[in-house]
Amino acid sequence: MTIVLIAALAYLTAAALLYRAMGQPDPQPGRGWLAAALPAVALHAGYHLLVAWRTPGGPDMHFFSALSLVGLGVAGMTMLVGARGRMAALGLFAFPLAAVLLVAYHFHGHTTSTVLDWRLQLHAWLALLAYATLAIAAVLAVMLRIQERALRQRTFSTRLRSLPPLTELETLLFRTIGAGFVLLSLTLLTGVLFVEDMLSQHLVHKTVLSVLSWLVFGGLLLGRWRYGWRGVRAVRWTLTAMVLLLLAFFGSKFVLELVLGRH
């Protein structure tokens, strides 16, 4: 519990430092928040390693554990990207989310997992990394929408001025989607190659929703390359694809594990 509490407090401290820095006249938030974010991410990762060492079976990939791992990935990537000045604003969303998911995982408890061979473990870790990357893209899409709306209404506050320029934010959004799309493609490919019986494992609906999300992300990237899509259209497509992806993995896991009691 001590590790979880310290990590959660460090996450919230990092977010608070970012929020305070973004209210200053200087648009650059500085790097003071890193002093809190770095130990938070390290403790978060250490907690999962400690649980994996103590829990028999394979790595814990059940509902709350998977959510916490995605939160860890989002926080870790936010810390890396946020070191580039104004991109640190991502932490206002990512760090509190990671804290909540870590605490939820701790209080829900840890479930013994079946032993997975390296192929299924590869598939699972690719999936979690893809979800974390595309979750970053969803946050960037929300930030882009907020900034565009403020620009149209001419209501820029001091904190909104701390966000990256619109073109820079949009460029990072599509780069993140591109990276997430590659990871999601590898996830689907390894699923096709390594998962033996999708019907008995209740994976049909998960696969269908994942493919739909993959098609939406792919369509958005194609539209960006071919027609120069941007702005509100990019935001809507990104959030739609992310909702499909959340339903595919966490929606199905919620129903199977927490409602139906199947693991």
Image (spheres, grey):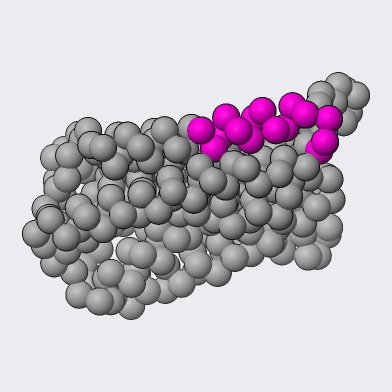
Residue 180, placed above or below residue 262: below
Quarter-of-image position of residue 260: top left
Residue 45, horizontal then vertical, whole percent: 35, 54
Principal SS element in the magenta part? helix
Residue at the (54%, 46%) spot, across then down = 35
* Residue 243 shown in magenta: no
Residue 58, horizontal then vertical, whole percent: 17, 63
Residue 128, placed above or below residue 237: below
Q: Is residue 127 left or right of residue 12?
A: left
Residue at the (42%, 33%) spot, across then down = 9
Looking at the image, can residue 209 be seen? Answer: no
Q: Residue furthest left?
A: 56
Q: Is residue 156 left or right of residue 46?
A: right
Residue 73, horizontal then vertical, whole percent: 45, 54
* Residue 21 shown in magenta: yes
How many discs mark residues in the rendered view?
A: 0
Q: Is residue 132 left or right of residue 154?
A: left
Residue at the (35%, 37%) spot, across then down = 6
Along the line of sight, which residue is nearer the eye, 77 or 32?
32
Residue 184, placed above or below residue 65: below
Looking at the image, can residue 20 be seen? Answer: yes
Q: Quadrant of the N terminus?
A: top left
- Give the magenta part as a residue range: 13-27
Quarter-of-image position of residue 128: bottom left
Residue 144, horizontal then vertical, whole percent: 74, 40
Along the line of sight, which residue is nearer the eye, 259 or 43?
43
